[in-house]
Amino acid sequence: MSQNKTYLGPLLVLSGAVLWGTTGTTQALAPEGATPLAIGAMRLLVGGLCLLAIALFRQAFKPGGYWPTHLVAVTAISMAAYQPFFFGGVAKTGVAVGTVVGIGSAPIMAGILVFLFRGERPGKKWLVSTLLAITGCYLLFTVKENVTVNYVGVLMSLGAGLAYASYVVFSKSLLDKNRPEAVIAVVFCISALLLLPILLTQPLNWLLEWRGAAVALHLGIVATAIAYFLFSKGLSLVPAATAVTLTLAEPLTAATLGVTVLGERLTAPAFAGIGLLLLGILILSVSSKKRPAHSKVNEKV
């Protein structure tokens, strides 16, 4: 891998994660009546259509592509499942615990999945940076409110972490043999269809307001289509476990926007959490020239 690609992969993943970090602030600005499930399903619908348009425009679907049914199904179901699991977990156990468990568990689960299904050993650098980033995420969120634990909510948040990790790991196998634009277009369109029944059960009158329409368009185009386009490009250049840890830049961005846009205040432990998050991300972003980022023993997917 060339030196430019060595740094380009982490940069693209981080760029996608930063755009994901705008999701929470955008949702907070949505009109009354916009439920989390409706927002999540609409996000996938708008994003999926945009990604399909991008893929068709760039002629990303090549003859003889690698589209095994089981991989496409698992990847699409994982992305669709993430939305209700994450929002349901947050609703039951609070933003702090839901976010820490959902986002913080994803890198650990990704490390296990890539070893089981792709034969990749993430390595010590990944382990150290992941522990630093998860600790930082914990400090950043749990000091912001009184923490209560609802075990059903925790299980749902763990489901969200597993769903996201599964999406990354199995989409990596598709990205190995297809163009990123084609992969995310197929996966997101199928995911949007899977969530369409949920969307039709939710109130949608908030979309008629200009603010509601702006929220849906931003989440669908910026925080989904553009963000996942950048992420998938980066994922094709870096190991899956590394990519999931790098996406912990998402809560870092969300916290920054919470302070600058929503007027939230951060405590000293929260600032310490930001520092640990940045350190963990920095360790993974600066690749070593002496050894590969991961070793592959026996790819099974």
Image (cartoon, rainbow, N blue to C red):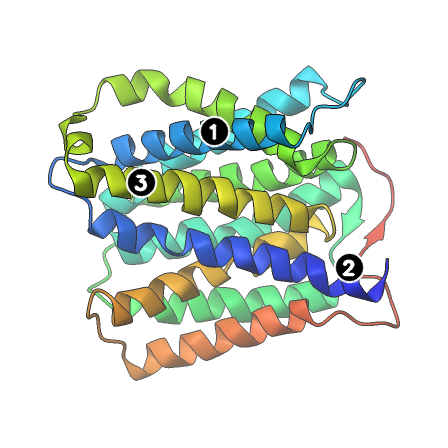
Q: Along the line of sight, which residue is nearer the eye, 202 or 15?
A: 15
Tell which tag, 3 or 2, sits nearer the viewer.
Answer: 2
Q: Residues within 10 Å of mark 3 (few under 14, many from 20)?
A: many
User: Badge 1 is on which residue?
Assistant: 48
Q: Which amino acid, by three-letter code, is at mark 2?
A: Lys
- The answer to whether mark 3 and mark 2 are in CB contact below 8 A is no
Residue 279's spot in the image, x, y percent?
56, 76
- Mark 1 lies on a secondary structure that is helix
Mark carried by residue 87: 3
Q: Residue at x 20, y 39 (%)?
A: 212
Cα–Cα span, label 2 and label 1: 27 Å
Residue 54 in the figure: left or right of residue 251 = right
Q: Which amino acid, by three-letter code, is at mark 1?
A: Gly
Mark carried by residue 5: 2
- Residue 109 higher or lower than 265, as above or below: above
Residue 295's spot in the image, x, y percent?
84, 54
Residue 207's spot in the image, x, y percent?
20, 31
Q: Report if residue 201 is visible in the image.
A: yes
Q: Which amino acid, by three-letter code, is at mark 3?
A: Phe
